[in-house]
């Protein structure tokens, strides 16, 4: 599967101000390319911290569905976050793992998912019982539909190709933060 295509399909389903946290690099580049929404947070530089940021958003705003899109290398860097999500059980949080078996943006170095590590098995082992690999694009969409309706937390794994991202996020961290916080601020 292709990350940009899956991201487009996911974003096209969002109607209720869902928050989307894009992990470092290519994942948030494709989130940017899928159509900018103020409820998208394009995380820059902080490798591995997209899931913890999304967990904070999900816990702070339980009425808002929150998605986090993350690469395999970044997830591997912060595996404890999966256990923290399982332990805190945010019903509104969905983790999408885009697994290309490499650290693509820094030079395509092979990650452990290219050999031994199965991220869905890891997520289940961390306590995220509702974890599944998407078999194809249609199955990915049905998993997203379920995550939009039924209580989570959800973990959706998608094995993706090595295509370059479809865009490049504007790299203004202060602007991204301000816009996101304004968009998700409770209305007075
Ligand atoms: C703590 C830390 N170590 C290393 C980096 C450099 N770095 C930025 S992105 C990246 C690779 C990310 O890999 P992955 O999450 O699998 O995403 P992909 O590039 O494959 O889309 C690395 C090593 C960083 N930003 N922070």
Image: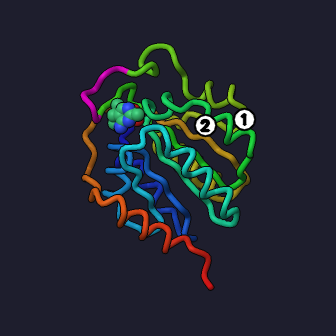
Q: Residues within 10 Å of mark 1 (few under 14, many from 20)?
A: some
Is residue 76 positioned above or below 114 on the image?
Answer: below
Q: Residues within 10 Å of mark 2 (few under 14, many from 20)?
A: many
**Residue 184 located within the stretch drawn in magenta:** no
Q: Quadrant of the C terminus?
A: bottom right
| Towards the viewer: 38 or 2 | 38
Give whichever of discs 1 and 2 has the lower sequence position: 2
Q: What residue is rendered at 37% in x and 49% in y?
A: 44
Secondary structure category for the residue under label 2: helix
Q: What residue is rendered at 57% in x and 30% in y?
A: 79
Query: Is residue 182 left or right of 127 when viewed as pictured?
Result: left
Task: State which quadrant residue 56 falls in.
Answer: bottom right
Secondary structure category for the residue under label 1: loop
Find residue 107 and report its horizontal and vertical position in percent.
Answer: 24, 28
Residue that protrudes farthest toward the top in the picture: 116
Q: Nearer the viewer, mark 1 or mark 2?
A: 2
Q: Is the CB–ligand 1 distance for label 2 below 8 Å?
A: no
Q: Which residues are magenta?
A: 105-110
Q: Is the CB–ligand 1 distance for label 1 below 8 Å?
A: no
Residue that protrudes farthest toward the front in the picture: 174
Find residue 98 and report its horizontal and vertical position in percent.
Answer: 44, 38
Query: Is residue 75 left or right of 91 when viewed as pictured?
Result: left
Residue 160 visible in the current orientation: no
Q: Quadrant of the N terminus?
A: top left
Query: Is residue 137 left or right of 130 when viewed as pictured?
Result: left
Number of dots carrying numbers: 2
- Classify the position of ligand 1 by quadrant: top left, top right, bottom left or bottom right: top left
Find residue 78 and report its horizontal and vertical position in percent.
Answer: 53, 32
Residue assigned mark 2: 81
Query: Which label number is shown at residue 129?
Result: 1
């Amino acid at each position: 599967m292709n990350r940009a295509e899956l991201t487009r399909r996911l974003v096209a389903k969002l109607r209720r101000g869902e928050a989307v946290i894009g992990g470092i690099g290519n994942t948030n580049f494709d989130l940017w390319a899928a159509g900018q929404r103020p409820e998208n947070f394009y995380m820059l530089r902080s490798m591995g911290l997209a899931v913890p940021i999304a967990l904070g958003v999900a816990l702070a705003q339980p009425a808002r569905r929150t998605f986090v899109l993350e690469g395999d290398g970044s997830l591997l860097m912060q595996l404890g976050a999966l256990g923290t999500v399982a332990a805190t059980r945010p019903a509104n949080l969905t983790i999408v793992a885009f697994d290309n078996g490499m650290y693509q943006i820094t030079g395509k170095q092979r990650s452990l998912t290219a050999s031994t590590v199965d991220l869905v098995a890891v997520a289940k082992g961390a306590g995220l019982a509702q974890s599944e690999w998407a078999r194809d694009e249609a199955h990915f969409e049905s998993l997203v539909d379920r995550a939009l309706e039924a209580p989570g937390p959800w973990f959706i794994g998608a094995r993706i190709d090595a295509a370059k991202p479809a865009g490049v996020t504007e790299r203004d961290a202060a602007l991204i933060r301000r816009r996101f916080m304004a968009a998700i601020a409770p209305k007075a």
